[in-house]
Amino acid sequence: MTIISTPVLILGGGVAGVSAALELARRGVPSVLAEKGPRLGGRVRDFCCKATQACVHCGACRLGDLLAEAAARPEAAFRSLALAAEAQREGGVWQVELRPQPDEGEADPLAQPLAEKTTVNAQAVILAVGYEPFDPRRKTRFGYGRVPGVMTALELEAMLGQGVLVGHDGQPPESVAFIQCVGSRDESLGNLYCSRVCCGFALDMAGLIKEGWPETAVTFFHMDVQGYGPSWEEALPHMRQAIDFVRAMPGEVSAGENGPRVCFAGPDGQPRSREFGLVALSQGLTPPASAGALSEMFGLNRNQDGFLGEDAALAVSGAQGVFVAGTAQGPRGIVESIDHAALAAGAAMESLFRAGKEAAHG
Amino acid sequence: MARVCLIWVERPGLEGLDPAEVAKRAGLSLDPGGAIPAAVVTAPEWAAPPAVRSRLAGKPAQWLDLAGEVGGGPAEKRLARAAAAVARAAGRAALGTLPQVYTAQPAQTVLVAGAGLAAVAAARQAGLLGHPVILATPFGRAAQAGADDEAEEVSLLAAQLPAQVEVLAEAELRHLSGAAGDFTAELQTPQGAQLKRFGAVVLAPAGGYAPPELGLDPELAKPVADLPPEGLAGSPDKWLQAAVIAGVDAPATADAFARAVEAALALQARDFVQTTLLFSEARVASEGGERRYREARQAGVIAARVAAGGLEVAQGGRLLKWRDLLLDEEVQLRPDLLAVAGPVAAALPAFLANPVLWPAWPQLVPEGPRFSGGRTARSGLYIIGALRGTAPGRARRVEAAAAAADLHDRLTQGRATPVPSVRNTACASCLTCVRVCAHGVPRYGSDAIVCAPAACVACGMCAAECPAEAIAPPGWSNPELIAGLEAGLAKSAGTKAVLFACGQSGAQAFAELCRQGHEWPEGLLLYPVPCAGRVGMQLIMKALSSGAAGIMVAGCHDGNCRSVSGNLRARLRAGETAALLERLGLGPERVEFLHLASNQPRRLAQAVDRFVSTLG
C-alpha cells in the first residue's frame, strides 16, 4: 500500500483531465492524474480529423498538443490503470483509494501504470470522467443491432477514420442517412437536454463523405440544427446545398430490400419511406457510467440531467473541494472540454489558496 | 573586441601576410579553434571551407574578401591595409555579439481593459496568480456590469478582487502596441493620459445585445432583456398579442434563443397575454435550454417556425407575415408588443485599425481550435467576452480562467520562450518580419528591430521570409537549418525525398507512425520544422541541390495554423518552387505540399508512399 500526497487529484485521463493537469501546471500547482484505462486521451483518441480542404475546428488534433505539453510539464504526474474505489474527507483532505486495474498490455509512454493499491491524499479533487454515449439499443425502433446497415455515428466515425465507407451489403453505399437526437431531447427517455455536439459532428462527417465519395447522397434527419461555433454557422448554407436536410424524426427503421428502410413524416404530415445504403444514428451524450458511484463516494450532487456537479458556473460540485471538468458536467465539444478544465483548475487553485489562508490564521 | 576572432583562410593575394601580425594590429585574437562568439574570416562565404562555414553557422561572422582589400605594393602598406580592413569588419562582427538586441525582462503587470463578468473574473484570476493587475473600466467602479451581464454576479465577484488589482475608473484604452512581456498602453483617465508598460493585456469590453436589422420600429420592438414591462396585462375582452423574435433571418445563437424563451415565458405568465415565439431553428443547446423551451410550449407559447428569411415585416413590425410550414398557409400577426433577441456584441477598439502596429488585426481572433480560451494570434493579448461573441455567464468565466493561466505561464517562463536574434549588421529594416509575425514579436524600435521578450513561439516564419537572413529564432536560422540538412543527407546516403514536417501536425503524425512500427519507403529523410511556414524556397532548393530528388512539406490544414499563415505561406513557397522547377525542365512534381493534422498518420503514410514512388 503506497501513500501519495498531492494538492490536486484528477480522476479521468481524457482531454478534460489532461487539460486540467496542464491548467494546474500553468498555475504552478502540482497534480496527480489517475486514469482507469491503459492510455491517456480518452474518447478523443478515436476521433479522426474531419478537415476536407480546411480545418472544421473539431479540435480532435489538439490531443497531440496536449500530450506533448504534458510530457514537458514536471508538475503533472500521470497514473494509468488506476481506478478510484473509495474516498473520504478528513481534516480538509480527501483520501482517495486507487486500485490497480488488469493490464491490457497497451501502455502509454506518458503514464506510469499503478502497481499496487494506493491512497492519494489531496486537498482538492477534479472529476473529469467524461460521458457515456447513449446506447441506441434502448431505442429499438431505430433497428440498431437488428437491421443490417444501421450503425452508430461513432462506428461510422471509426470507419471513416480508416478511410473506409461500406454499407449494409459490404459495398460503398449510394446513400447515407443520419438520424439525429438519438437519446437526446427525448421525453420518453427523460433525456430533456440537447447534446450540443452531434449536429456538428454528423455534418462534419457528411462533409467527409461528400469529399471522399462525391456520388453518395447524404440525408440528414433532424429536429433543429444546433449551431456549433461561428464559422460553422457560415458553412451551414453550403451544407444545405450538398446535403438533403429533412426536418423529421423517423418513426421506424426496418430491413428493406436495398438496405435499411427509414419511415418518416413528410412536410405534409403524410408517411413516407426511403431506403438507404447506410443509416448512422447520432447518439447523444449521457452521464458517465460512474456518475452514481462517484456522487456517492464524494457525497456530491448531480444536476437535473444526471451529470455531475450542480453549480455549472463555477464547475463546483456539492462536496467541498470537489470540482468537475469536461463532459462529466454536461455535453460539450472537445475544445469546450479543454477550456472547461481551466474553470475547474482555477476553482481548485482558489480553494487551495483559501485552505492555505485558513491554516495561516489558525 | 576581444570576443571577435580572426579566422585566416589562405587565398590568392594574401601571400606574405602574417596572420598573427594582422590580428595583433587589428586588436583581435587569432582563431583558437573550438567555439567562438564571433569571427572575421579572410575569405568570402562561398570561398571558405565547409568546416569553417558550419562552425560559424548562426554566429555573427563577417566574410571579408581580404585579398581585394589588401591589393599590391610594399609589404608594410599591405599589412596596414589588411589590419584596417579586419578591424573595420571586426567592429561589425562585434555588434552581432551583443546579447540579443532586446534584453529587458518581461513586464509582469497585467492590463485588463473592460468591464463586466469577463473583465472582473480575469483580473481576479491574474491577481491570485501573483501579478499586479490594472483593471481599466470605462465605468465609475469595477462592480458595474455591461448590459449583457448579471449585475449581481459581477458585483459579488468585484467585491472579492485581490489586493494586487488596482481599479482605474473611467479609463479608456486609447492605444496599444507590442506583444507578450512588452506591451505599451496609453490609458486616458479623468486625471490625464498615462503610458504604461504591461506584460499581458486582456481585452474584455462591456457588451450589449445587438438587435438584428429587420426594419422594426424601435418604439415598438424592444430587446428581450427589457421585457416584460411592469404592470403589463390584457383583459378578457382584449387579449394582448406579444411576439418574440429569436433569429428569423439567420438562426439565433443558443444564448439568444434561451433569452427569447425566457422573455416568452415571462410574457405568457401575464394575464390575458398570448405570446408567439418566432424562429427559424430552435437553438436549445444551452444548459437547460431544452427544458425551458418545452416549458414555454406547455405554458401556451405558440412556437412559430419561419423559414430563414421568410418573415415579412410591415409597418415597423406592427404587422408580421410568414408562411406556416405545417399548415402551408400564410399567417398574419399584429403584435401589441414585440421583443427581439440578438447576439451579444461589443465594439472593436479603434487602435486596432493601425495597419503598422496591428498588421493582421482582422485575423487577430482566429477561429481555429488552437485559439480557444481567449487566446489570440498576438502573444500575450487575450480577447474575451462580448468582443469575441461569447455568451454571458459560465463561458466567460472559462475564458477568463484560461487566459489568466496562459498569460501567467507565458510571463513566468513556465514555457521556455525563445527570443529571435537579430543581426543588425545584416538587417535592412525592411520590416518584412514585422509584417509576417502573427505573434507580434518583432517591432521597429528607434533604429533597429527589437523583439518582445515573452512572445515568440519559434515558428521561424520571420527567418523564412527575411530577405537578408537577419532574424531567426534561436536554432532556426538558415545556416543552422542547412547545416542540419546537410548532416542528415550525409548520414543517410541515397536519400530520395526529404519530408519537412510541421511540429504541430506532420512531425506528430510521423512520430505516431514510428510508434506503430510503420515501414517508411527507402530513401526518406524526415526534417522536423517548428512550423511549415519555416520552409522557404531557399531551403527547398538547398535540399534539392544537395541530392534529394523530391521535397514534401507537411503542414496544417487551412485555418489550423498556430501562426495563422504558416501553412499558407509554405504551400505558396512550394508552389513557387514547383513552377520554377517546371521552367527549368526539372519536373514540378518534385515539390509537394500536404495538408495534414496531427491525428492523420494514415494520410501522411499514404501520401509519402505515393510521393516517393513517383520519384522513381
Image (cartoon, rainbow, N blue to C red):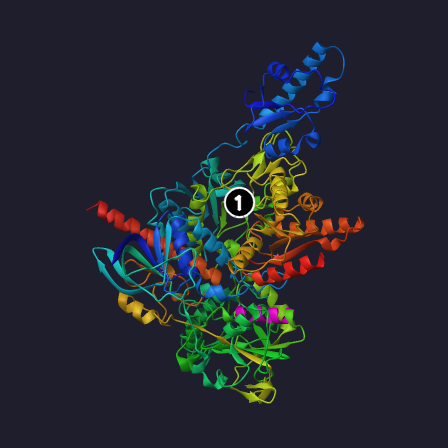
Quick check: A31 left or right of B28?
left
Q: Position of residue B551 (x, y in %)?
A: 67, 51
Question: Which residues fall within the magenta stretch?
Answer: A199-211
Whether residue B136 is visible here, answered yes or no, is: no
Q: Is residue B165 magenta?
A: no
Asked if B255 appears above or below B526 in the picture, the reply is below
Q: Secondary structure at mark 1?
A: loop
Q: Quadrant of residue B31?
A: top right
Mark 1 surroundings: few (<14), some (14-19) or many (≥20) residues within 10 A: many
Whether residue B433 is visible here, answered yes or no, is: yes
Quick check: B236 left or right of B560?
left
Q: Which residue is mark 1?
A: B457
The quarter of the image holding the C terminus of chain B is bottom right
Asked if A154 appears above or below B453 in the picture, the reply is below
> Between residues B527 and A142, which one lies in front from this camera angle?
B527
Q: Is residue A209 magenta?
A: yes
Quick check: A100 left or right of B270?
left
Q: Position of residue B23 (x, y in %)?
A: 61, 17
